[in-house]
Amino acid sequence: MTTSDTPATALTIDQVDELSERQLGYFDKCTEKLGFIPNVLKAYSFSSAKLQAFADLYNDLMLGDSNLSKLEREMIAVAVSGVNQCYYCLTAHGAAVRQLSGKPELGEQMVMNFRAADLDDRQTAMLEFADKLTRTPHAIVEQDRDALRAVGFSDRDIWDISGVASFFNMSNRMASAVDMRPNDEYHAQAR
């Protein structure tokens, strides 16, 4: 695979320091698994500290120990990114939903409007919570957490749903602020 020469962001920032062997290894792993280095990682790579903080939190939330499946976490990323209209994350995480679900139409439905997708009650409750946390975080009340418990989520699961949704709200805002561009390869994945 080849990646476009489009800059990762609209900003030009001088390199602060060298990337560590661990970080270069992470880039190698991305290239091996994906065929490219995601532009979000390139965007943060001007500073090894910022890149490491972003990658560590992302990996913990999206790949770490959780009762939420990888697909469910990606669905949260897409639902939150849909509210925020984050082009980068809708493109990248919509591709992940297509790939993880094996259903290209699910990824497309999620990107357009998760309510258009054929979701079960558990997924719907999870995404409605993430949507409310994105739109009106101050309005989250015990009734919202109880709605998640009613479909089988534990309090730890609610923490994880909240963590993923919160991370993508931050990430969406950074991506929008710096005009982060998705890698061209995402558009063709799992179609």
Image (cartoon, rainbow, N blue to C red):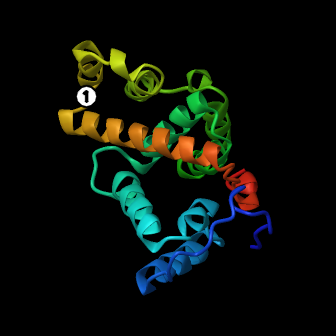
Q: Quadrant of the N terminus?
A: bottom right
Q: Compared to 138, does 29 lie above or below?
A: below
State whether residue 65 appears in this view. yes
Check disc 1: other Cα within 10 Å, few if <14, some if 14-19, many if 20+.
Answer: few
Seen from this angle, which residue lies furthest bottom?
21
Frontmost residue, 69 versus 82? 82
Q: Compared to 44, does 110 lie above or below?
A: above
Find residue 165 and report its horizontal and vertical position in percent.
42, 37
State the SS at label 1: loop
Find residue 163 and report its horizontal and vertical position in percent.
34, 41
- What residue lies at 40% left-to-right and 53% top-to-bottom? 62
For residue 6, what is the image quadrant? bottom right
- What residue lies at 19% left-to-right and 33% top-to-bottom? 155
- What residue lies at 58% left-to-right and 78% top-to-bottom? 32
For residue 156, what is the image quadrant? top left
Seen from this angle, which residue lies furthest right?
5
Q: Which residue is mark 1?
A: 152
State whether residue 103 appears in this view. no
Find residue 182 and report its horizontal and vertical position in percent.
69, 54
Find residue 13 and report its horizontal and vertical position in percent.
63, 66
Frontmost residue, 86 versus 101? 86
